Amino acid sequence: MEPMASLSPIDVVDLTSRLIAVPSVTPATGSVFDVVEAELAALGFTVERFVEGEAPDGPVENLLAVREGAGRHIAFAGHLDVVPPGDGWTGGAFEPRIAGGILYGRGATDMKGSIAAWIAAAAAVPADAGTLSLLLTGDEEGPATWGTKLLMQRMAERGVAPDAILVGEPTSVARLGDMVKIGRRGSCIVWIDVPGREGHVAYPHLADNPIPKLVRILSAIDGITLDEGSEGFQASNIEPTTVDVGNPAGNVIPAKASARLSIRFNDLHRGEDLGAMIARVAKAEVPEAEVRWTVYGEAFRTRPSPWVDEVAAAIHAVTGIEPERSTTGGTSDARFLHVLAPIVEFGPPNATMHKRDEAVAVDDLHALVAIYRRVIEG
């Protein structure tokens, strides 16, 4: 690994710490964006912020920053919102601390560290070395109703059109640089409600128990094999995530039984088609079943391209690792942004994301600055 000293006039550890210190549980607005705007303005970026939405999914703040230069346009996308910290932290979740070369705090790896590293990298690059833009939302960990999709609309209105996009999600696994994401599976959530008629368990003939009907539906769904995988993607899967009757009594047949399914699917499918298929299966078993679904993102993959090779080469130059090019894992806002330009996701190891004592190695933050700088400089 090449030396990490004197890479940037911005101290990436300090900036990451200052971002962590601002609680920004999704949906996020305000102070955490103030920290970023102050840094970007000093670097010559034109910064635009806007707040959209209402409770419960909002309000949400978004930031679009651009620094014009000659040559190609590289955009960095990320999110300043974090998941709730939960209990059991060794220290305060929003009180950054360093111990043993590790920086702890909610958002350290997902993804305030990556954002700080990209800003530090931009600070180390001459202002005329191509156009840079930063796309930040306060609604990635939530439903994304008022986030990146609105940022994309604002980009279109302003004529902001990147040639390539880098997303700072924590993609590494065992060590920094061992994996980048070049695509993601799609995501579809399905809700199934089976109506019944409540009654006393001793008089089942006077009631209509919805639970056996729901069990039949789930059994039929369990027998479905969507595919065996496709080029670049693992097999699609359907997973029941909740089964509920809302019944506090042990001697009452419930009036309704419900289930929720999560489908993660590859590029052999479309989300709407999968939702409709589940509805057909459910109604074939129980015609009165009610089924609804929401598609949170379609499967996509960045085909082999110079952009993917450039990011991989920058990682190898700094870490000595040839990253795996993967489509595994959950969803990210790349599911929206990939329509704009070739897109790659790369960031620190993800072992502690969404966990108590979330953390990032100080050395990895400095290495990220070096990698992002190489990517910017091409």
Image: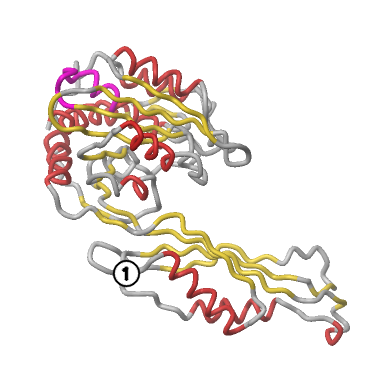
Q: Position of residue 64 (x, y in %)?
A: 37, 28
Is residue 119 found left or right of 3 in the rendered image? right
Location of residue 263 with respect to 285 vertically, above or below? above
Q: What is the three-letter code of the residue carrying label 1? A: Leu
Residue at the image point whose x is 53% and y is 79% from the top? 280
Image colouring: secondary structure
Count of numbered circles on the image: 1
Query: Which percent across, then down, holds residue 4?
Result: 19, 23
In the picture, residue 78 is in which quadrant?
top left
Give the residue drawn at x 17%, y 46%. Answer: 308
Q: Quadrant of residue 245?
A: bottom right
In the rendered image, residue 360, in percent from the top left (x then y), is placed at 36, 32
Whether residue 127 appears in magenta in the rendering, the answer is yes
Residue 320 belongs to magenta span: no
> Residue 101 falls in which quadrant of the image?
top left
* Residue displayed at 24% across by 13% down: 9
Q: Of helix, strand and loop, which one carries label 1?
A: loop
In the picture shown, does residue 21 fall above or below 158?
A: above
Q: Which residues are magenta?
A: 118-130
| Residue 91 shows in this picture | no
Image quadrant in which the N terminus is located: top left
Q: Residue at x 66, y 68 (%)?
A: 258
Looking at the image, which is closer to me, 143 or 318?
Answer: 143
Q: Quadrant of the C terminus?
A: top left
Q: Is residue 247 left or right of residue 133?
A: right
Q: Nearer the viewer, residue 90 or 71?
A: 71
Q: Can the viewer see residue 51 in this picture?
A: yes
Residue assigned mark 1? 268
Q: Residues within 10 Å of mark 1 (few under 14, many from 20)?
A: some
- x and y, in percent, of residue 115 in the image: 34, 29
